[in-house]
Amino acid sequence: MKFLNKENLPYSFQLTSDDFFNRYDKKLSVEDIFKQTIQLGTGISFAYIDGNHSYEHVKRDFKNVDNYLINTGFILFDDSMDGLRFGSALFMKEMKRNKNYQLIDKNPNYLFKKVINH
């Protein structure tokens, strides 16, 4: 990332979603892995879920992200391609039934867009 885009790095954190969103809920000012400081607590437009690949953890990661993901925001799930035995792949059955999310692509991992209609 630093080589390809050093002037406009994304904010990236290596934390469990529980730890990250604990800080997010408190609207803390934190430093990311690139030593950039950001104030947490606003809407999220894109999330890449790549953590513990058990079903329970993926579901919890999703719930944490869903609380802050803006309408029209995106979630990409790591190791979610069809046929894998990871919990992330198993959780895709629930995501495909979730009326608040639209499947955008699976190439091979699943990308969803939040589409809540009020």
Image (tube, rainbow, N blue to C red):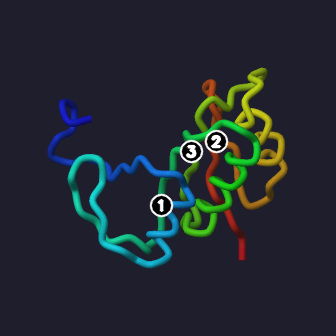
**x and y percentages locating residue 118 in the rendered image:** 72, 77
Mark toward the start of the polypeptide (1 vs 3): 1
Front of the two marks 2 and 1: 1
Where disc 3 sits, the SS reads strand
Earlier residue among tags 2 and 3: 3
Residue at image point 69% right, 26% down:
81
Mark 3 Cα shell of 10 Å, populated few (<14), some (14-19), many (≥20) = some
Q: Report, in whole angstroms, how far the alpha carbon at label 2 lies from the one at label 3.
A: 16 Å
Whether residue 16 sits left or right of residue 30 in the image: it is right
Residue 86 is marked as none
Q: Is residue 63 above or below residue 34?
A: below
- Looking at the rendered image, the disc whose residue lies closer to the viewer, 2 or 3, is 3
Question: Viewer-proximal residue, 74 or 21?
Answer: 21
Give the percent coordinates (x, y) of residue 38: 28, 66
Q: Which mark is residue 49?
A: 3
| Separation (CA) of disc 1 from disc 3 | 12 Å
Residue found at x 55% / y 39%: 50
Task: Give percent across and percent down for residue 114.
Answer: 64, 58
* Marked residue nearer the N-terminal end (2 or 1): 1
Residue that label 2 marks: 104
Q: Amino acid at mark 3?
A: Ile
Helix or strand or loop: what does disc 1 sit on? helix
Residue type for callout 2: Ile
Callout 2–callout 1 Cβ contact below 8 Å: no
Query: In terms of image quadrants, where is residue 3?
Result: top left
Instruction: Locate residue 11 relative to residue 20 in the image: left or right.
Output: left
Q: Residue at x 63, y 24 (%)?
A: 108
Q: Quadrant of residue 110?
A: top right
Q: CA distance from mark 2 to mark 1?
A: 26 Å
Point out which mark residue 20 bears.
1
